[in-house]
Image (tube, coloured by chain):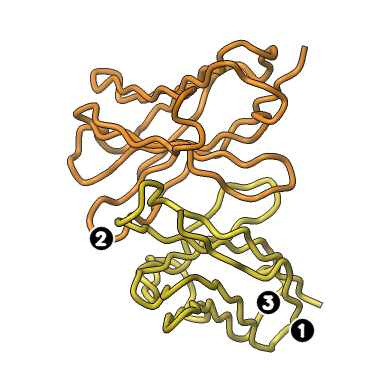
Amino acid sequence: QVQLQESGPGLVKPSQTLSLTCTVSGGSISSGDYYWSWIRQPPGKGLEWIGYIYYSGSTYYNPSLKSRVTISVDTSKNQFSLKLSSVTAADTAVYYCARVVIKGPHAIDYWGQGTLVTVSS
Amino acid sequence: SYVLTQPPSVSVAPGQTARITCGGNNIGSKSVHWYQQKPGQAPVLVVYDDSDRPSGIPERFSGSNSGNTATLTISRVEAGDEADYYCQVWDSSSDHPEVFGGGTKLTVL
């Protein structure tokens, strides 16, 4: 059974960089069958794609966040990471890491439990 | 970018059938996935590729997709089905191909 677990600070100051890591267990992040994704959900609101990465390092970023987002992968640790720079209160959200099935139209078959990140001074 | 429109809320009595729609321009030409999200929990895939169910999802959950509307149908609704439901498509022709609908709150009366 694949499991994903987010980790990182729950509180980030405005203008700083949000950093989160997702650790994958029960499966290899180097599998060519999946993208490894970050998705967020502001309190009381809907889901928003941030972006995703392939094990080789190729990435997709949501155009609305592209200038501030970096997603990276560490296959040796079976982890991938998110950095979001110049954060504001609007970036306060539950951040999920998730696995996207490449074959076909990109269904998300596994999600982490999510971690709340609050942007506040 | 591609826009998916869902009704904010749907209400249904236990034992009845709930239908949650997801509207988009010619959405019938795309494959739609549906996720269930209960309070404080991560979303769970309940229908993929318009009408397929992952292992472990009850047969009460079904999907269809045609024209400009995709529909998630929940038969014999139970109290435990109360949740938010999100549709998702992959629009490969767009520079922003990964899209979620705004979500629908299903209330079981």
Numbered circles on residues, count? 3
Image colour for chain A is orange
Residue positioned 43% across, 83% down in the render: B67
Could you tell me which secondary element the residue under label 1 belongs to?
A: loop
Classify mark 3: residues with Cα within 10 Å, few (<14), some (14-19) or many (20+). some
Percent from the top left, x then y, of residue B18? Answer: 64, 82
Residue positioned 68% across, 22% down in the render: A88
- Label 2 sits on residue: A104
Above or below: residue A76 compared with residue A104: above
Above or below: residue A63 compared with residue A57: below
Is disc 1 in the same subunit as disc 2? no
Alpha carbons under labels 1 and 3: distance apart:
8 Å
Residue positioned 32% across, 37% down in the render: A26
Amino acid type assigned to the residue bearing label 3 in the image? Glu
Label annotation for residue B78: 3
Could you tell me which secondary element the residue under label 3 belongs to?
A: loop
- Label 1 sits on residue: B13
Please tell me whether mark 2 or mark 3 is closer to you in this view. Answer: 2
Percent from the top left, x then y, of residue B24? Answer: 50, 70
The quadrant where residue A91 appears: top right
Could you tell me which secondary element the residue under label 2 belongs to?
A: loop
Alpha carbons under labels 2 and 3: distance apart:
31 Å
Image colour for chain B is yellow
In the picture provided, is B85 more to the left or to the right than A121?
A: left
Q: Tell which subunit mark 3 falls on.
A: B
In the picture provided, is B48 more to the left or to the right than B20?
A: left
Amino acid type assigned to the residue bearing label 2 in the image? Gly
